Image (spheres, helix red, strand yellow):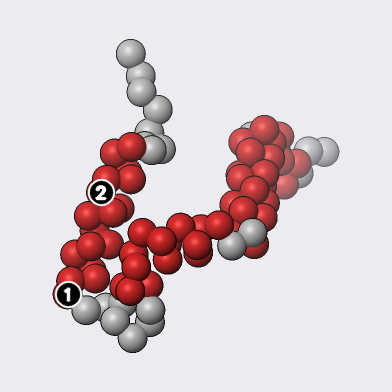
């Protein structure tokens, strides 16, 4: 007899599952290095301090930085 759970397990894309596991491990390890926090402090300047982070000018500056970086390093592949 084939149970329902065995049927479901045969439909799992294990390659994609391993890709996501590896991605989360890589991002977690990269975050532990402190490089993202240093980059944030470098690009945001005084706006990286908690006390002023939510002020209007800092929010505007954050949006500008995110917009520029998302156009430089897009996560959407170019399909031709």
> If the image is split into quadrants, where does the N terminus sit?
top right
What secondary structure is found at the residue carrying circle 1?
helix
Q: In the image, is residue 60 above or below residue 70? A: below
Badge 2: residue crowd in 10 Å (few <14, some 14–19, many ≥20): few
Residue 8 rendering spot, x and y as whole percentages: 67, 41
| Residue at the outermost top position | 80
Distance between the Cα atoms at labels 1 and 2? 17 Å
Label 1 vs 2, first from the N-terminus: 1
> If the image is split into quadrants, where does the C terminus sit?
top left
Q: Which residue is mark 1?
A: 56
Relative depth, front residue between 7 and 64: 64
Relative depth, front residue between 28 and 43: 43
Residue 38 appears in the picture as rendered: yes
Q: In the image, is residue 9 above or below residue 43? A: above
Q: Residue at x 68, y 40 (%)?
A: 18
Residue 67's label in the rendered image is 2
Residue 69 rendering spot, x and y as whole percentages: 33, 45
Residue 25 rendering spot, x and y as whole percentages: 67, 51
């Amino acid at each position: 007899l084939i149970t329902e759970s065995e049927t479901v397990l045969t439909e799992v894309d294990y390659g994609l599952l391993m890709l996501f596991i590896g991605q989360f491990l890589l991002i977690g390890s990269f975050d532990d290095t402190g490089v993202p926090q240093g980059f944030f402090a470098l690009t945001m300047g005084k706006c990286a301090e908690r006390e002023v982070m939510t002020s209007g000018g800092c929010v505007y500056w954050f949006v500008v930085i995110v917009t520029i970086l998302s156009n430089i390093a897009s996560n959407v592949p170019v399909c031709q």
